[in-house]
Amino acid sequence: MTNKYKILTEFIKDISSETPDVQTYMFVKENISKYHLDIDIKSKTLKSKIIEVNTTLKFQDKELNEKKSHFEIVYSSIVKIEDEVTDKKDLEKIILCDVQNEIYPKLEKAFVNLLNDSGFPGIKIEKKINFDKLYQERFN
């Protein structure tokens, strides 16, 4: 089976690490195990059959702590969809699964580097994201 799309380019569109002060840094360093990884995928058509797909990863504390850091990356992929793709479900699967499966290793590496370079070495994203499973769950 050949791909029904081609990634023309991909890049980090936005990257952010915010820790307001040393006290917050020390608190976060002790409590970073409570942080959760969230993912959000948005797309918009740039022109016929060319789509911008923005995948956002956020690593954040869901607790109501006053001391918290914020880590976020927006990874943009410009995707050309083949002419034979006309069904909306096929297009959704390409954006939400196929493109994600292809770009995620690079996105995850950049995000882990952001965390390490922000003073939180050794953070690993243990739970791998199964984009195909998430896509299927949308319809159940």
Image: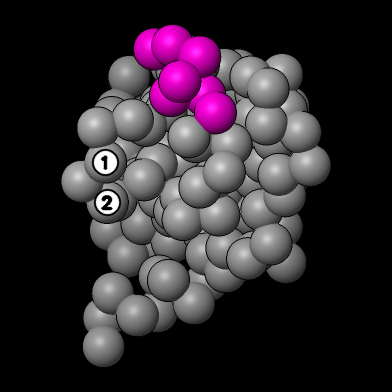
In the rendered image, residue 102, in percent from the top left (x then y), is placed at 68, 47
At 51% across and 47% down in the image, what residue appears?
31
Q: In which quarter of the image is the C terminus?
A: bottom left
Residue type of the residue flagged with mark 1: Asn
Give the residue furthest to the right: 122
Dot 1 falls on a residue whose secondary structure is loop
Pointer 2 local density, CA inside 10 Å: few below 14, some 14–19, many at least 20: few
Task: Tell me which secondary structure the magenta stretch mostly adopts.
Answer: helix
Q: How far apart are marks 2 and 1 (CA)?
A: 6 Å
Q: Quadrant of the N terminus?
A: bottom right
Position of 30 with respect to 93 (left or right) is right
Q: Label 2 amino acid?
A: Glu
43 in magenta: no
Residue 126: horizontal and vertical position, in percent?
69, 62
Toward which corner of the image does residue 114 lie, by quadrant? top right
Question: Which element carries disc 2, helix, strand or loop?
Answer: loop
**Region rendered in magenta:** 20-26
> Residue 112 versus residue 132: which sits nearer the camera?
112
Location of residue 97 with respect to 135 vertically, above or below:
above
Name the residue rendered at 79%, 42% in the picture: 122
Q: Which residue is the site of mark 2?
A: 63
Q: Is residue 74 visible?
A: no
Q: Position of residue 57 (x, y in %)?
A: 46, 39
Q: Which of 53 and 73 is in front in this view?
A: 73
- Answer with left or right where residue 84 lies relative to residue 115: left
Look at 27% across and 51% down and name the residue there: 63
> Is label 2 in contact with label 1 (beta carbons under 8 Å)?
yes
Query: Relative to 98, is 70 on the left or the right?
Result: left
The percent coordinates of residue 123 (x first, y second) are: 71, 44
Q: Indicate which disc residue 65 carries.
A: 1
Quadrant for residue 20, please give it: top left
Closer to us: 48 or 27: 27
